[in-house]
Amino acid sequence: MNKVDYLVIADSKDFTSDYITIELNKRNKNYLRINRDNFNSYEIEWDVLNEVLKIGIQDTIYVINKDLKGVYYRAPVYIRYYSQSNYEEQLYKSQWMAFVKNIICFENAKWINNPVDTYKAENKMLQLKYAKELGFLVPKTVVINSSSPLINEEKLYAVKSIDTLFLRNGEEECFLYTNTLSGENINNAELRLAPLTIQELITPKIDLRITVIENNVYSVKIIKNDNGIKDDWRKEKEDVKFIPINIPKEIENKCIKLIQKLGLKYGAIDMAICNNNYYFIEINPTGEWAWLVETAKLPIYKSIVNVLTE
């Protein structure tokens, strides 16, 4: 039986987690990677009160106990859409997700990030509340499902869902980006079905992605043809450049404090610069970062493993 010091919970196609396992392997750490899409090929035996979890993969038994040192877990906690799959698939997804969340029983381990803290941190309104308390500039934000006197019909607004929105159209997955709409269009729209987040439009802007791993901060600006992106930069992800930059130390410190306040070890923070002012937009506690290793040559995976193994 192999004793596990570090656990990586991922998906077999998640090459972001590949960076972590390769680095753990380079450092000769005893780790186990389990993939959510392969769970039904594993054999588990969890002696809960004695804190011993055994996972059988092929012909090898891996043992996790209260001496587990670290867990890397990047997946979102919220269910982003309701599956129309059959009962067996629903059972598989719901109960294995519950199994993963209950691994928080191994409380001595350092989590990046703990699913309980991730669940809390994924709430966008709470993020904005904490950001304001820490002194960030935050765009004026309202949540509505009907016309409102708070919406000036002569202004433009950034319109987004309250939470990251994935929908299914048959076999096709649909994702909702941030869009720019006039106040007049918003107030004349039929919004009763679901509430929307309406934010003051920050323009002209340059988007920033600030990746924080405990006390390590990596910042990039996101530009196209040396200019900022007018709308949601994710619509043009293949055509933009990610340029490493230095941001004011004051902003770095606020980013670190926000991560701490949310109980996280890792967070991907989106900000925008407008007229030399830094505006907080949102934080993703499970945000993707591998593309920053590829495009901006940022050694984010090394910082994650450093924190995980300290």
Image: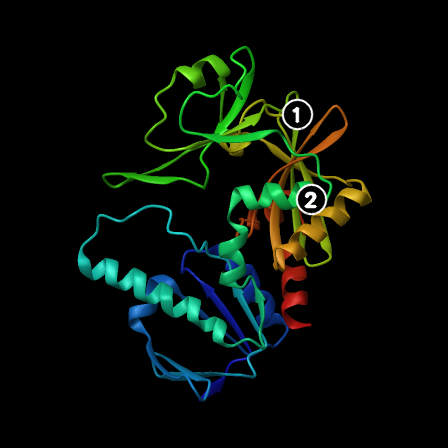
Q: Secondary structure at mark 1?
A: loop
Q: Nearer the viewer, residue 5 or 197?
A: 197
Res. 17 mark? none
Q: Secondary structure at mark 2?
A: helix
Image quadrant containing the C terminus: bottom right
User: Can you name the residue that lies furthest to the top here?
Assistant: 154
Classify residue 230 by image quadrant. top right
Q: Which residue is mark 1?
A: 205
Residue 293 in view: yes
Which kind of residue does numbered mark 1 sit on? Lys
The image shows residue 16, relative to residue 236, as above or below, that is: below
Q: Earlier in the sequence, mark 1 or mark 2?
A: 2
The image shows residue 166, relative to residue 265, as above or below, that is: above
Residue depicted at x 33% and y 68% = 39
Q: Nearer the viewer, residue 96 or 150?
A: 150
Classify residue 296 by image quadrant. top right
Q: Residue 290: image x %, image y %? A: 56, 50
The image shows residue 243, relative to residue 186, as above or below, that is: below
- Looking at the image, is mark 1 or mark 2 nearer the viewer? 2
Using residue 82 as the reference point, say whether residue 75 is left or right of it: right
Image quadrant containing the N terminus: bottom left
Q: Which residue is mark 2?
A: 133
CA gap, disc 1 and disc 2 = 23 Å
Q: Residue 37: image x %, image y %? A: 34, 61
User: Can you name the residue that lies furthest to the front here?
Assistant: 149
